[in-house]
Image: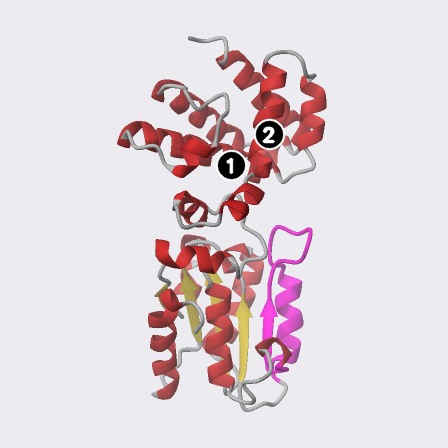
Amino acid sequence: MNHKWLSENYNYAKNLIDKEKFPNCLIFTGNKSIGKKDLADEVAKYYLGGNSGYPISENVNYKIIRVDEGSKNIKVEQVRDLLEKIYLKTDKRVVCIQDAEKLNVSSSNSLLKIIEEPPMGTKFIFTTSKLSSIIPTILSRSTILKCNNPCPDDINNYLSYLDEIDIDNYYVLSNLNNQNVNSKFYEEKFSLINDFFYDLEDVISSSENIINFSKKFSVYKIEHIINMLLFIIINFQKSNVLENNSKFYSNNNNIIKDYNSKKLDFIYDKLINIKKNIDIIQNNETILFSICVLFKKLSKVS
């Protein structure tokens, strides 16, 4: 297991396999981007055996279901397509459901019977960062393993494994405060933050049109922008409370850096409310326009 913080989880699953007690469904839960997918791959590889020199993705008995590009949920059609093939005879098979919190009610219900009574040798592995979103009837049929987080000493090395860091990944992002993190990586991942606030300051000073600003940033995933803002507020609040400026605080100079706790709380509450209504509004430019108006008004308040 390459990620040493997950070695305990891997060894536990490996021991279940060795003792022939591998459950029908094993759920790995924990923070985003801490290696749950890699852990699932390694456990599946051990269970399926075979030539360890080949990547597990090339094993015909390892099936992965994930959210299709452009979709928000794992659809029932994806599960039904799997069920049509799962009874093909084989000694062992592993089905991995990535980001299982994205299963909708229909796709979840369609899995219940097959999880309870799978074909001989077939096992399921779920990965999720939101265990509470998985329906109770699946949880009751599963063994749940809470995955460990990488410690600060692991983070810098682990970042090299990741193709992308979601801006809403609070755990990994918070470790970018650590002094051991490569500064180039830090700067690249936070370029969106810098661009956003640079242009926002122009909007507030009226040198940039608010509509142009809204159009420019509407191409990004709006949830990521809001979570980015929430993350900044949380870190600035943390610095205020602890009276200890983190690397994140020191490396970010923007309009809210010197806001007092009352202002930061106000922005946080407003952003949470906007986030709750994203699906209702369904227009990135309108949402960004509202965020701009919020900051513009607040800049005039002492």
Disc 1 from disc 2: Cα separation: 10 Å
> What residue lies at 42% left-to-right and 32% top-to-bottom?
250
Q: Which segment did they paint magenta?
A: 59-87
Determine the image quadrant of residue 8. Answer: bottom left
Q: What element carries label 2?
A: helix
Is tag 1's residue or tag 2's residue first in the polypeptide sequence? 2
Q: Which of marks 1 and 2 is in front?
A: 2
Label 1 sits on residue: 228
Q: What is the crowding at mark 2: few (fewer than 14 residues within 10 Å), some, or many (at least 20)?
A: some
Using the image, determine if residue 225 lies above or below residue 263.
below
x and y, in percent, of residue 37 in the image: 51, 65
Q: What is the crowding at mark 1: few (fewer than 14 residues within 10 Å), some, or many (at least 20)?
A: many
x and y, in percent, of residue 108 in the image: 53, 62
Q: In this view, does 87 lie to the left or right of 142?
A: right
> What residue lies at 46% left-to-right and 70% top-to-bottom?
39
Name the mark on residue 100: none
Q: What residue type is labelled 1?
A: Met
Seen from the viewer's position, the closer of residues 77 and 42 is 42
x and y, in percent, of residue 73 in the image: 60, 54
Identify the image quadrant of the C terminus: top left
> What residue lies at 40% left-to-right and 50% top-to-bottom?
180
